[in-house]
């Protein structure tokens, strides 16, 4: 329990702009998410949809002391986790794609068991690249997509973290999704990717 | 797209999205006020718009406009949805008036917003209906259904039940004989269009259907002419619109790419690409990005198809290349000429005009503007790197693939890859721009693909190889890939009887050198040859042994190497390389088992190799490695010097020599040798790594950081750089930075033992013992790390601090046992001496500790790391006086005070250390 209290405190310090707290928080969240993700990946059959929101939620329950936490804490935690989740998924997908490109055997460490079908890995990597592209033109829209998509933040939570109005979040969300779809359509047909 | 344009697209789109769907198009028309580019961009986004607020970002559940059974224009009953094309949705429908089935295509609603579209569309359909050719898809009718906002415009055409040529080709590459009938049909259909003055404009495998028929596959061209009805503006403009554009212009002719008038010759160009793809399975230009590809097509010749298919008939080669000529006038004049040339009915003209030359009309301004755009689009992908080597001569030979499942062939392939790499690197001296990444590094980095070659080594050329056996013959196919363009730049095929592995290897080296344009002879052309010819078959076993030696972390692999080296020696007892390989294998076996009897075996075989042929760098290097490992540093120095006297650019020998100097405390010479390795190969990150590690051992962290900055700059996706940078930052007392680098490391390589162990150390120093324990335990489960006294000892300290004395005891017992065994083999290892002392103290056996510590200090008197470690051990024994004195010496020698303050063992003495300075 001591750890939870500590992380909850870190989360508070992070919200107040303490960068040292951010480092520790990020590393704790990353460790936890990786562990949980690996477990899910083992359990779920290949090709299943990975419920990223469920994963982040599980990490939250495990790491943060719920008695003390308020909803703003939750939002900030999820915002950090969204970024980490994106790293984990993309990293994983990249490895799948690289293996496929090489056309060679490709052993994954046990905690990296397959979760995405190859096609899906390609999608994730392309999405990540497209999102990167979007961030260059429109950082805020990309941030909103990352939080909502990889972290499962609600409109209101996203608004809290980015300190913008929920209406703006909605508009960025609408625009970002359309832009990404249009971008991803390029050449390879419709992207099919679904996450909870 | 310029920022103001982005903002305009976004605001118009968002305003439109808030309206009812039927009012959006009209609103956009109005809001864009004649700016066609703006309008097109907004409509493209609106086409993707989803009123649903769900989180399903990218899944467009297939929303079909029409459902099964629906009747359109009181005549066509929808049977099912077939697919979605550029113009809109396609359905299979039953014609209730005339009977039979048709394909029915609904025109995308946003296209209808163009007021000129309907007339243009109608004109194209009328034209298309005049074409009746078995290889052209018949167009029947245009129709409308509904009115106002709900109006649907559609047209009907012949329903073809087959697959697209693209799908058809995905499963096969056609021989010229098999391709000819299909080519004839496609060309025939295209000719029929040209006769009616229709230019297809969009011929590609996706637009050609292949339908089974009683006379074999029938090819049918679809979707023609209509492209013009849809097209708005010039193609170049379309290309440069940042990211908003879809599709790859793989089949577009240069004139199309530049927005010039399109003629039947443009279709001939596309036909050329199609033919190319049919017989090679590849595309003539393979730039990853649309623009890259487009620019390439302007300035480069296509890869000749015979590079992919060595035996391709000359008629095919020259015809395809003529079709791909930049200038329309240089292409065959008609589709029937293309077929005549392919089939040999028209004799192939003597190759006179080079197809690659730039078209006469090509305005340089256009090329420059295209290049300029390309620069801006592509620039962010390139990073500036401190390299002096011409990129395409920076070569990585990737592990070979093996076709089939012969395990012996697998290891043969690994050994062949290793010896081929080393032989090619022999060309480095005279070919100043050549830089071959050593096989050991390729293995260490786990590089498997051409993109790995770029990201992990910053290389320009990757060599992929595949090995196949047929009876008693083996065939090696090497493919050179330009990793910047991600396209094939050459290939080599060598075939030999398997027992003649030596000639296979020699032929492969020579031909690979040719393919890489290495005209100058290797440094060691003469010396490389064995003194005596090797008995048949012996070299194959040797290569297999070398293959197994690539996996020195697996005991079974090393044992196989020993068996195979012995088998080579059974065939030829005087085979020097096999003796050396046997020696190295025994050394690795010792490293894994820590059983000292293998050391003797290693020394014996290593010496035998040198006796038999001391004129080979390899035998001396093997010997040097064994001597280094056993602490015979002066002998190792001589071995590496000998190797360098034969081959003065041999990286492995240079690195070995520097390590020997370093162990002999000749730090100036060591540094100079590391620097020499860097000067010889400035684009090779391993040189900087070695020098960085040297500085690290000296406790010179700032200089080490400089070297690691180079490592990261050269290979930004390489976990090694970040991992070591983390340690250096830790040593400097920059803990936040250390953690950042550590996290970056684990992102790139989550199973990296050193990163786990270092992160654990950070937690340990912060008092987070449980976390540290968890990480150490995790690290101990990976690979061979359970044989590391360092990890066991660290786990012991963490457990001790956390009050888990039982686990601590177990851990220290393991650590002591392993460290003692290591000292038996190399009694001069400072690190093992000081660590063993600390383990003994921690587990309460203090009797021999002082002797161990004094010995360590004696071997490395001024080394700050040693001083601190020894001071920590004295502190934990309660000898505070000695601990404080040593710590003061370390600080005097430059050890950072704030790092010292973090040391769990020395923290209590901190006041005392600092005050008495």
Image (cartoon, coloured by chain):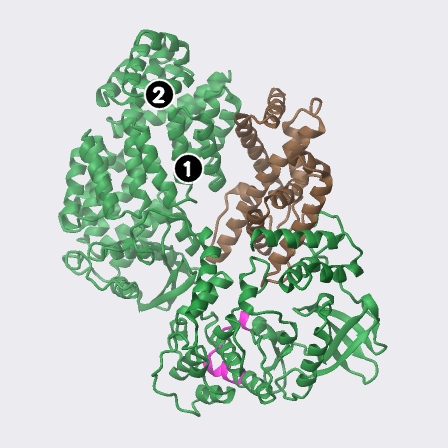
Residue B426 is at least partly visible in this image: yes
Q: Which residues are magenta?
A: B169-182
Q: Residue at x 68, y 46 (%)?
A: A173
Residue sitting at 47 percent across and 27 percent down? B736
Name above or below for residue B391 compared with residue A166: below
Residue B865: give x, y in percent of width and height.
31, 23
**Residue closest to the eye, B575 or A177:** A177
Q: How many marks?
A: 2
Q: Position of residue B745 (x, y in %)?
A: 45, 38
> For the residues carrying marks 1 and 2, which lies nearer the camera in this image?
2
* Residue on which the image places disc 1: B722
Neighbourhood count class around disc 2 (C-alpha, 10 Å): few under 14, some 14–19, many 20 upward: some
The chain that appears green in the image is B
Query: Split into 4 quadrants, where in the image is the C terminus of chain B?
Result: top left
Secondary element under disc 1, as helix, strand or loop, is helix
Residue A104 visible within the image: no
Is residue B63 one of those drawn in magenta?
no
Q: Chain of mark 2?
A: B
Q: Give the main secondary structure, helix, strand or loop, of the magenta stretch.
A: helix
Query: Label 1 marks which chain's residue?
Result: B
| Chain A shade in the render | brown
Q: Which residue is mark 2?
A: B896
Give left or right: position of B7 versus B276.
right
Q: Quadrant of residue B656?
A: top left
Q: Earlier in the sequence, mark 1 or mark 2?
A: 1
Q: Where does residue B286 sit, x and y in percent of width and height?
A: 46, 65
Residue B602 in the image, given as x and y percentages of width and height: 24, 40
- Tell me the element at label 2: loop
């Amino acid at each position: 329990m001591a750890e939870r209290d500590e992380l909850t405190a870190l989360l508070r310090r992070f919200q107040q702009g303490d960068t040292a707290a951010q480092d520790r928080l990020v590393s704790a969240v990353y460790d936890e998410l990786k562990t949980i993700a690996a477990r899910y990946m083992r359990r779920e059959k290949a090709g299943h949809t990975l419920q990223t929101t469920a994963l982040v939620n599980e990490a939250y329950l495990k790491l943060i002391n719920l008695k003390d936490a308020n909803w703003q804490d939750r939002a900030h935690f999820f915002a950090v986790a969204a970024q980490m989740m994106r790293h984990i998924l993309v990293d994983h997908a990249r490895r799948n794609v690289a293996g496929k490109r090489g056309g060679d055997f490709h052993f994954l460490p046990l905690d990296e068991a397959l979760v995405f079908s190859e096609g899906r890995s390609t999608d994730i990597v392309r999405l990540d690249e497209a999102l990167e592209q979007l961030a260059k033109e429109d950082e805020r829209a990309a941030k909103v997509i990352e939080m909502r998509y990889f972290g499962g933040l609600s409109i209101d939570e996203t608004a809290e973290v980015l300190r913008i109005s929920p209406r703006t979040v909605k508009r960025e969300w609408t625009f970002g999704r359309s832009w990404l779809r249009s971008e991803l359509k390029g050449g390879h047909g419709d992207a099919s990717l679904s996450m909870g | 797209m310029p920022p103001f344009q982005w903002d305009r697209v976004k605001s118009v789109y968002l305003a439109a999205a808030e309206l009812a769907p039927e009012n959006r198009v009209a609103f956009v028309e109005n809001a864009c006020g004649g700016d066609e580019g703006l309008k097109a961009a907004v409509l493209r986004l609106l086409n993707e718009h989803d009123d649903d607020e769900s989180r399903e970002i990218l899944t467009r559940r297939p929303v079909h406009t029409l459902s099964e059974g629906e009747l359109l224009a009181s005549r066509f009953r929808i049977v099912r949805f077939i697919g979605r094309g550029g113009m809109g949705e396609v359905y299979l429908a039953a014609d209730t008036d005339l009977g039979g089935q048709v394909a029915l295509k609904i025109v995308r609603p946003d296209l209808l917003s163009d007021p000129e579209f309907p007339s243009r569309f109608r004109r194209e359909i009328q034209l298309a209906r005049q074409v009746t050719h078995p290889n052209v898809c018949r167009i029947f009718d245009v129709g409308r259904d509904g009115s106002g906002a709900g109006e649907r415009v559609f047209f009907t055409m012949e329903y073809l039940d087959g697959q697209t040529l693209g799908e058809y080709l995905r499963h096969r590459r056609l021989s010229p004989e098999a391709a000819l009938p299909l080519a004839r049909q496609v060309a025939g259909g295209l000719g029929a269009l040209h006769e009616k003055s229709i230019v297809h404009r969009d011929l590609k495998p996706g637009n050609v259907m292949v339908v089974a028929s009683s006379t074999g596959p029938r090819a049918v061209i679809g979707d023609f002419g209509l492209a013009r009805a849809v097209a708005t503006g010039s193609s170049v403009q379309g290309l440069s619109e940042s990211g908003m554009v879809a599709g790859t212009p793989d089949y577009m002719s240069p004139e199309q790419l530049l927005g010039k008038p399109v003629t039947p010759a443009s279709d001939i160009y596309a036909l050329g690409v199609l033919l190319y793809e049919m017989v090679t399975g590849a595309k003539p230009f393979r730039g990853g990005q649309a623009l890259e590809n487009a620019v390439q097509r302007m300035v480069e010749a296509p890869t000749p198809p015979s590079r992919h298919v060595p035996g391709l008939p000359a008629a095919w080669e020259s015809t395809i290349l003529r079709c791909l000529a930049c200038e329309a006038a240089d292409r065959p004049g008609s589709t029937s000429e293309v077929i005549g040339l392919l089939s040999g009915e028209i004799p192939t003209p003597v190759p006179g005009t080079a197809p690659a030359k730039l078209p006469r009309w090509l305005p340089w301004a256009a090329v420059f503007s295209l290049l300029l755009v390309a620069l801006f689009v592509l620039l962010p992908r390139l990073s500036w790197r401190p390299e002096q080597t011409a990129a395409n001569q920076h070569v990585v030979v990737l592990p070979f693939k093996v076709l089939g499942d012969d395990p012996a062939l697998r290891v043969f392939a690994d050994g062949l890859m290793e010896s081929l790499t080393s032989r090619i690197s022999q060309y480095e001296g005279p070919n100043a721009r050549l830089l071959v990444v050593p096989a050991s590094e390729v293995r260490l980095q786990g590089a498997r693909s051409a993109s790995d070659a770029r990201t992990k080594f910053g290389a320009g050329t990757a060599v992929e190889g595949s090995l196949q056996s047929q009876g008693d013959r083996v065939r090696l196919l090497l493919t050179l890939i330009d990793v910047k363009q991600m396209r094939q730049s050459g290939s080599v095929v060598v075939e030999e009887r398997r027992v003649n592995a030596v000639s296979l290897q020699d032929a492969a080296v020579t031909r690979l050198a040719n393919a890489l344009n290495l005209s100058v002879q290797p440094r060691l052309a003469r010396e490389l040859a064995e003194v005596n010819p090797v008995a048949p078959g012996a070299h194959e076993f040797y290569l297999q042994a070398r293959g197994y030696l690539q996996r020195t972390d697996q005991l079974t692999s090393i044992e196989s190497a020993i068996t195979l080296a012995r088998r080579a020696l059974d065939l030829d007892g005087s085979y020097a390389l096999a003796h050396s390989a046997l020696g190295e294998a025994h050394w690795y076996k010792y490293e894994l088992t820590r059983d000292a009897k293998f050391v003797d075996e290693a020394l014996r075989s290593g010496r035998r190799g040198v006796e038999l042929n001391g004129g080979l760098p390899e035998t001396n290097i093997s010997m040097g490695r064994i001597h280094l490992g056993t602490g015979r540093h002066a002998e190792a120095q001589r071995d590496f010097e000998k190797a360098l006297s034969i081959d003065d650019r041999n990286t492995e020998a240079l690195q070995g020599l520097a390590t020997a100097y370093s162990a002999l405390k000749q730090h100036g010479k060591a540094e100079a040798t590391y620097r020499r390795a860097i000067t010889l190969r400035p684009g090779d990150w391993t040189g900087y790594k070695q020098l960085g590690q040297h500085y690290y051992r000296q406790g010179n962290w700032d200089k080490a950081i400089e070297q690691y900055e180079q490592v990261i700059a050269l290979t930004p996706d390489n976990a090694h750089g970040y991992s070591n940078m983390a340690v250096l930052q830790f040593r400097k007392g920059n803990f936040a930075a250390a953690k950042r680098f550590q996290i970056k490391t684990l992102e790139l390589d989550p199973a990296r033992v050193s990163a786990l162990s270092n992160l654990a150390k950070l937690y340990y120093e912060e008092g987070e013992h449980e976390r540290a324990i968890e990480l150490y335990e995790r690290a101990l489960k990976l690979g061979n790390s359970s044989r590391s006294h360092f990890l066991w000892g660290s786990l012991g300290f963490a457990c001790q601090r956390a009050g888990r004395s039982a686990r601590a005891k177990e851990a220290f017992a393991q650590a002591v046992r392993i460290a003692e065994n290591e000292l038996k083999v190399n009694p001069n290892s400072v690190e093992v001496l000081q660590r063993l002392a600390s383990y003994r103290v921690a587990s309460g056996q203090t009797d021999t500790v002082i002797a161990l510590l004094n010995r360590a200090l004696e071997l490395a008197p001024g080394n700050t790391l040693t001083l601190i470690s020894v001071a920590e051990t004295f502190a934990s024994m309660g000898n505070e006086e000695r601990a404080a004195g040593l710590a003061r010496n370390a600080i005097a020698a430059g050890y950072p005070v704030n790092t010292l303050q973090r040391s769990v063992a020395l923290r209590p003495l901190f006041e005392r250390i600092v005050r008495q300075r």
